[in-house]
Image: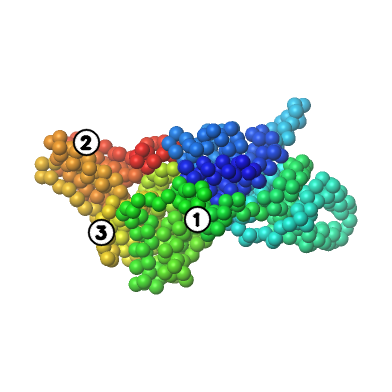
Amino acid sequence: AEAVRAEMIDAVSITGGHLGSGLGVVELTVALHHVFDTPDDRIVWDVGHQCYPHKILTERRDRIRTLRQGGGLSGFTKRSESVYDPFGAAHSSTSISAALGMAVARDLDNAAARQTGRAQKRRNAIAVIGDGSMSAGMAYEALNNAGALHSRLIVILNDNDMSIAPPVGAMSAYLARLASGGAYQSLRETAKQLGKLLPKALYQRAAAAEEYARSLVVGGGTMFEEMGFHYVGPVDGHNLDHLLPVLKNVRDAEHGPILLHVVTRKGKGYAPAEASADRYHGVVKFDVVSGVQAKAKPNAPAYTRVFGESLIKAADADERVVAITAAMPGGTGIDLFGKAHPDRTFDVGIAEQHAVTFAGGLATEGYRPFVAIYSTFLQRAYDQVVHDVALQNLPVRFCMDRAGLVGADGATHAGAFDLAYLCCLPNMTVMAAADEAELVHMVATAHVHDSGPIALRYPRGEGVGLELPERGEALPIGKGRVVRRDAEARVAVLSLGTRLSEALKAADLLAEQGVAVTVADARFAKPLDEALILELAREHEVLITIEEGSRGGFGAMVLHLLAERGALDAGRVRVRTMTLPDAYQDHDSPEKMY
C-alpha cells in the first residue's frame, strides 16, 4: 500500500489528474485485489477517478506516467484498455447497475450449467461506490432491484465524507467481522427458517426485534437492510487488519446481496491533500515535496468565470434569478454565484434529472432558474429536458459548460452532442458563444427570455482576450452577424461557437492565396437566422458550416433549412458541414483533438 501510494503521488505530480480520491482507496484497492481473484472476479469502480491505484496493480504501472496524455492511459476505467476493467465509467452512480447485470449473467450461466451437468462459476461481482455517488437516483434504482433479485452481489460503500458513518474503531471492526461471518449468517438463516414455523404475528415480532438489535450493534444500515441488503460495517478502510477478514467473509458468503460500509479519508497519506478543502480532488502538475501546483500563465479569463460573474450581475438586478448545479459548483462557476447569493444557490448533488425538473418547478412559480451543468452530464437528464421543461414550454435556462472537446478527460466528458439533442426539441432556443464578450451578452439574453426554454453553450478554457462589456445586452433571438465581408467573396464560412477565431484565421490564409471569404457568426443554432443563411447561399458559390459538435447538430439544421427553402435546387451553391468526427475521440490536448 505504501509503494502504491508513493507511485501514485509521483505519477500524478507529472501528469496531473485526480489525486485525492485515489489516495483514499489505496488500502481498499490492495485488499480487494488480495482477497478477490481478478479479473475473473469483476470489480466495478464507480465514476473511475479513484482507479489509479487499481491501474498500478493491474499490469499498467509501467505506463502510469502516460495518464491522460495522448496515446496514454485513460484517467478512468476503460474496457478496451485492460481485462481488469470490466466496465468503463466516468459518469457517476452506474456501478451497482453494471455489477448487478454481471451477477445476474453469472446466475443465468450457472443455471444453464446445472441443467447440462457442467461446472458452475463462483465468480464475484463487486461495485465500489462513493457516498457522493449514492446521491444519484440511479444508485437507488439498482439497490432496489438488487434487493428484489437476491442475487449474490457485493456493494462496497466508500464513505469518505463522514456524512454517513459514525466513528469507527476496533469494536465496530469486530462487530462487522462477526456480522459478515459464516456462523452469524447461517445462524440468522436457520432462525429465519425456524421462525417461519411460528404463527405469523410472532415471526414478524421476532424479525423486527432482530433488526432492531442489529441496528443498535452495527449502526446506520437500516435503510440498506430495508432494501434487501445484508449490511456490514462500518469498517476502517485504511486498516488492513480490519478490512481483510471482513472482505474474506463477504467473498465467501452464500447469500446476497451484501453492502459493506467502508470509511476512508480522501487524500489519505499525503499531507498537502489532507489539508486541502477539496483533498486535491483534481490537480495539475505539482511539486511532490511542497504540494504546490503549477500555475498556468495568466491569460484571458476562463469562460466559466465569465459566466459566473455575468450571472451574479443578473441576480444583483433581479431577485427572481436562481442558480442550480448538480455537484459541480466549482466546475460551472456557480461557486462564485453562491458566495454572492447563497440563498439563491442550489447544489442538488449528483442528481441531474432532479436538477432539471426542480428548475421546472421554480419556473412555474415565476422564478428565472439557470441550470449550470456540463454538456456531457446534461445527457443524463434528457427526458426531464424533453418532458418536464420543453413540452411544457417552461423558461428554464440551460448553461452548458465544457461544450466541445475537453482534452485530458477524453470521450466521456466531451460535450459533443448537445446541439444535436437540443436543436430537435420544439420550443427550445439554442445559443453558442463565439468568445467571452458574446457569452456576457448571451447570459443577459437568457435572463430576459421568458417565452420558453433556452440553452447556451461555452467551452472549457480561456477566452480569446477580448475586453468584456460592463453589462450584457440581450441579443435579438435567432439573429446572427457577419464579422467579415468581402464584396468579391465566393466562399462563405458560417461558424457557430468558439471556432469563429479559427474561421477568421482560415479566411486570412485564403486571402493570401487570392480567395476572398465572408465569415459569419450564427450565434443561434435554433432558431436559425434564415435571412442571413439564405443570403450567404444565394451570394456565394461555397458555404461551409463549422461547429464544435457531432453530426446532426447545427450543420444539419442549416442543410434542412436550405433544402426546405429550395436554396439547393438550382445547384448554384455547394454546401459542406464541418463537425466533430462520427467517433468517440480518446484523450489528448484539445488542440490536437480539434
The numbered mark, 1 or 3, whose residue comes first in the sequence reads: 1
How much space separates mark 1 and mark 2, taking CA atoms?
41 Å
Question: What is the x, y in percent for residue 584?
Answer: 43, 37
Q: What SS does tag 1 mark?
A: helix
Which of 388 and 123 lies nearest the eye of the viewer?
A: 123
Q: Is residue 360 visible?
A: no
How much space separates mark 3 and mark 2, taking CA atoms?
36 Å
- Looking at the image, which residue is at 75% across and 28% down? 119
* Residue that mark 2 sits on: 574
Quadrant that contains the C terminus: top left
**Residue type at numbered disc 1:** Glu
Q: Nearer the viewer, mark 1 or mark 3?
A: 3
- Looking at the image, which residue is at 44% across and 43% down? 408
* Residue that mark 1 sits on: 352
* Residue that mark 3 sits on: 467
Q: Nearer the viewer, mark 3 or mark 2?
A: 3
